[in-house]
Amino acid sequence: MLPRSLAAPFGALAVALLAAVSLAGPAASSEPLPALDGATGWINSPPLTAQALRGKVVLVDFWTYSCINCLRTLPYVRAWAQKYGPNGLVVIGAHTPEFSFERSTANVQRAVRDLHIDYPVAVDSEYALWKAFGTRAWPSFFFVDANGRIRGQQLGEGRYDQAERMIQQLLREAGRQQVPSDLVAPQGEGTQAAAAPRQPSSDETYLGTARAEGYVAGADARSLALNQWTLAGNWHAQAEQVELDSPTGRIAYRFRARDLHLVLGPARGGKPVRFRVRIDGMPPGADHGSDTDAEGFGTVDAHRLYQLVRQSRDETRPRLFEIEFLDPGVRAHAFTFG
């Protein structure tokens, strides 16, 4: 999967940006670890500084909690933190938000808890660390040696073996003894499960007015072409989201991918919103996502990414996805696929 990027436009998939690993040698030209004092808060740790981290090998993971690409890297990042912590590795999750709701420290704290992250997380709600590192995409790994120099960068998910070999190399250079030589193989579940082998034919799709594409007003859902979507009900469109004003409402999308996710938030004040999902007019059955049951029912109870479809095989045919909200007030931000 290609990484999400701020390059063009803000948060969109950077089609022109190839996910890559850039590994520098120990030459003096490698950049120093930037100061970390731009973080607006810290979770699981007191504030860390570049000076205090000297002598440690550091992995900085830029992520945001509604990003499917970021979520799928977490099983590996957690496994590396646990495996190599005794050898002197420090993992820092730099949480830089895409959507406004991700700027809330309370929301990030809840996500860190729900995602079982126990390594330090720097809350980068003002993008100070993002800019200091020159970050271009979510997720991004920065590998820092024991001398405080950035020795490598990796953009996007995947190539975990290369990333882990880099961690091992830097630990050995630092004189650490008995550094493991094997590789982790975690099995993520739900939104953290590995992407499908086939690249989806449907791309990340934003619903807010700032970046919406593929919207067809007033369309019959059955008439939608691939990657088109429509709304039914009374919706209020804003820059980052559409918000349901009527007692019930629907979103329909013609997609082609194994997995379908939707970034959703509850009604204002945190009131839960019930929903029901259909695929080609039928309950999803075995193809339901981790946030729905076989009949397609689920509840929006927090602002996050919801996995609504996880097909049992990598489908090559277009499918019609429909979600009916049974209560008012839901906020819908973006579809992502996998």
Image: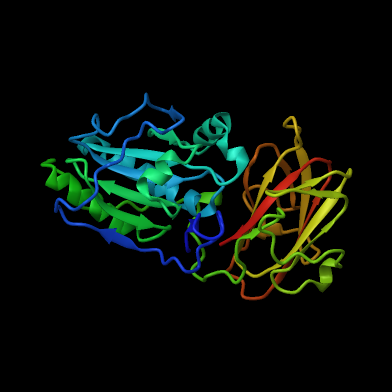
Colouring rule applied to residues? rainbow
The relative height of residue 288 versus residue 256 in the rendered view (above or below) is above
Q: Is residue 330 left or right of residue 194?
A: right
Q: Position of residue 52 (x, y in %)?
A: 24, 29
- Give the x, y percent position of residue 24: 21, 57
Task: Work out whether 110 lies above or below 319.
Answer: above
Please, is residue 327 above or below residue 19 in the view?
above
Can you give x and y, in whole percent of width and height, for residue 273 in the image? Answer: 77, 40
Task: From the viewer's side, name the closer residue of 125 and 84.
Answer: 125
Comparing 323 with 48, the one in front is: 48
Q: Residue at x 47, y 59 (%)?
A: 3
Assign the C terminus to one quadrant of the image: bottom right
Q: How many marks?
A: 0
Image coordinates of residue 5 in percent, x first then y, are: 49, 56
Residue at image coords 27%, 54% = 152
Q: Residue at x 30, y 40 (%)?
A: 34
Q: Nearer the viewer, residue 321 or 173?
A: 173
Snapshot quadrant of residue 47: top left
Residue at image coords 17%, 41%: 147
Work out whether 93 lies above or below 317: above
Q: Is residue 264 left or right of residue 108?
A: right
